Amino acid sequence: MTLFGTRLVAVLAGLLLIVLASPASAASFDCAKARSKVEKLICKDPQLSRQDEDLAKAYAEAQKLWDGQIAAYVKLTQRGWVGSRALETPGMSGGGILCEDDETALPCLRTIHADRIAVLRNPGFRLSGIYARGQDFLRIKATPTGLDFAYQLADAKASQGFTDDTAPVKVAVGQDVVSFPLTGTGPDACRLDAAFTADTVVLTQRGPCGGAKLGGWWKRDQTRDPEAELF
């Protein structure tokens, strides 16, 4: 082997060692500054590290939706999700924490990262949010595969309604008009046709909806996260 060939092999071997020694180099943050247990797991696990980088890309893409007009909402929901990916003490529930600090932590973190990436890249994500009309509210929540819809009205006689959360409503890329079939039959039957812009949704009510009056104009509230709403 020539001297040049020997040096080339040495350089390639050195690069390979660097790659093998740094399995989490794809993380979206500086692993030298990792502090929390979640951050350290991200840096340690190659799959989770790649997911973290993909998540950062999906988040950056989501901030550009509606020409950046809902960037505040996107940031709010991402901050809430990051808070929920902390590790909970085993056996302790509540507080919105998604994973426990035990042997299930790594697979759990991989799962919730995959789900969050899917949510941010869901074509319906740009339509999700809290929409208000006086004291009445709509909650349109993005899932990995579609949208869940619910409403809460100040009128106690027709206070709540929702879609079937086991069958999220599918949304295509660029789709701005969505039909939400709410649960209920007979006098409670209801379908809502929703036409979205960056700031508003206009509902056209189809059916009695149990006496609820839902048709008309609703305004997006970018200070509220649908994941944090309990109704």
Image: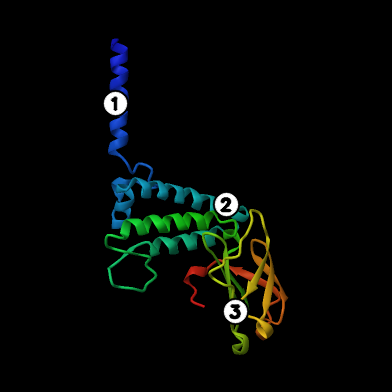
Q: Which mark is residue 97?
A: none
Q: In this view of the protein, can residue 214 be seen by the observer?
A: yes
Please give the name of the residue rendered at 32% of the width and 48% of the height, measured from the top-left corner. Answer: 45
Q: What colour scheme governs how the chains and residues are painted in the rendered image of this protein? A: rainbow
Q: Residues within 10 Å of mark 3 (few under 14, many from 20)?
A: many
Q: Tell me which amino acid carries mark 1.
A: Ala
Give the secondary structure at mark 2.
Answer: loop
Give the secondary structure at mark 3.
Answer: strand
Please give the name of the residue rendered at 61% of the width and 61% of the height, measured from the top-left corner. Answer: 170
Q: In this view of the protein, can residue 212 be seen by the observer?
A: no
Q: Tell me which amino acid carries mark 2.
A: Lys
Decide which of tag 1 and tag 3 comes sooner along the chain.
1
Q: Tell me which amino acid carries mark 3.
A: Gly
Tell me residue 201's x, y (percent).
67, 68
Tell me residue 161's x, y (percent).
59, 79
Q: Residues within 10 Å of mark 2 (few under 14, many from 20)?
A: some
Camera-side mark, 1 or 2: 1
Q: Quadrant of residue 140?
A: bottom right
Q: CA distance from mark 1 to mark 3?
A: 62 Å
Check the image and report above or below for 129 versus 39.
Answer: below
Q: Which residue is mark 3?
A: 161
Using residue 106 as the reference point, say whether residue 66 is left or right of it: right
Q: CA distance from mark 3 to mark 2?
A: 31 Å
Q: CA distance from mark 1 to mark 2?
A: 41 Å
Please give the name of the residue rendered at 72% of the width and 76% of the height, measured from the top-left corner. Answer: 206
Q: Which residue is mark 2?
A: 64
Tell me residue 166's x, y (percent).
53, 69
Q: Which residue is mark 1?
A: 13
Between 167 and 101, the one nearer to me in the picture: 167
Tell me residue 47's x, y (percent).
37, 47
The quadrant of the image that shows the N terminus is top left
